[in-house]
Amino acid sequence: MAMIGILLGAACIYLLQVRIYRRLWDKNLHASVAFEQHAVTEGESGELVEIIINQKWLPLPMLRVQFQSDRHLDFMQEGNVAVTDRCYKNDIFSLMMYQKITRRLKFRAIRRGYYTINQIDLDSTDLFMIEKLGRSIPCSASLYVYPKPTDTRRLLIPFQKMMGDILTRRYTYEDPFEFQGIRPYQPFDNMRDVNWKASARTGELRTNIHGYTVRQEVFLLLNLESESLVDDPALKEESIRIANSLAELFLHQGIPVGLYSNAKDIISKEPLFEPAGGGVQHLLTIRKKLARLDLTQPVCDFSQLDSDLKYNQDTSMLYILISSSQRQEVKYTFEKIAKDCPGSFWLLPIRQKDKQDDLSGKGFSIIRWEVDEFAS
């Protein structure tokens, strides 16, 4: 009878603790993962901070924390990582009452992109580690991986050619904010320039004299269509790196830069379009949008660009096409753009063994950019 009593008592204790754990195991249990940096550059390292808090009197003898990220974030120096199509991180903790655990997980950003962690899976047990308990909680960790700069030494000569063209064909226009004085009104003057206070004071019409300022903008056209049915991701990634480096070089010279790409944004699912602008913040915006280009989505037809740019096209704009594809539609579209904006350039990323088409007499200059055969 004593043995039966002991067994019944043990069973009651077990069932009681199971009931308690079923109700309370995840009460005041907090788990989060967040990237230490908002952004890193392709090839750089970063840290992911994992925080687990058990803010109650009930201990958790075993807590498994699982989440998944993109396989291009390399956590392989950390333990408990499995990589297939995704990177799966699996950590096991033992938490006492009112305990907080913080782990810093190092990773290396292998490839450009915009990476998110949207969910954390928590699995636990009762005190005897028999009853399995689990739930999932949302997460909003995100990281920009900017394109790494392309070889600046190789880019210097093409950049100097482009800057030379900019300096020789600068376009000046009247700046309404550059006030230089007042003179008598002439029949060809615009009525909006009349200085009514000065006219009332002198008894005759007077008009403001405005100064002139230099206007020159660069617009990068990033075509990420494939040359053939066989895709070459290395040429596309190199094209993105060239666009990133050219934008930085021009902006550092004080020249406004705009950007278009027919590849789609991973968030908006729309082609990239960024109007011309200047400054450090504009460069960061361009880098973010380049990071978010999703090459797994079908790209838009580059030939529709001609109609999209008509409202923005003027002779003060320098257009630079970055395209590894030499398809006839690409040539024809850029030829129409270059016809209205002479002095444009085509920067052509190409494998060393590949043939370059004859594009002479098309109204633009072409610059061959050879990509190493082993680049991937």
Image: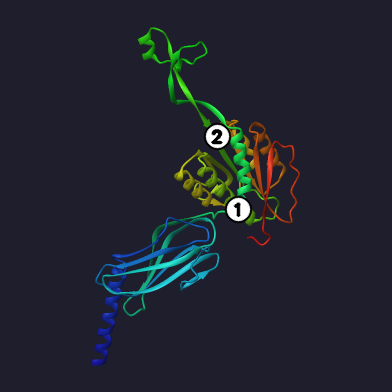
**Against 319, is 289 above or below?**
below
Dot 2 lies on which element?
A: loop
**Residue 256 at x, y = what percent?**
52, 39
**Residue 164 at x, y = what percent?**
61, 39
Residue that mark 1 sits on = 153
Q: Residues within 10 Å of mark 1 (few under 14, many from 20)?
A: few
Q: Is residue 15 left or right of residue 169?
A: left
Q: Nearer the viewer, mark 2 or mark 1?
A: 1
**Residue 209 at x, y = what percent?**
46, 19
Q: Residues within 10 Å of mark 2 (few under 14, many from 20)?
A: some
Q: How far is mark 2 from mark 1, CA to CA?
A: 25 Å
**Against 215, is 14 above or below?**
below
Residue that mark 2 sits on = 216
Task: Assign the N terminus to one quadrant of the image.
Answer: bottom left
227, 20: nearer the viewer: 227
Q: Amino acid at mark 1?
A: Arg
194, 353: nearer the viewer: 194
Residue drawn 33% across the image and 80% down it: 128
**Residue 165 at x, y = what percent?**
62, 37
Q: Quadrant of residue 202?
A: top left
Q: Amino acid at mark 2?
A: Gln
Farthest residue toward the top? 203
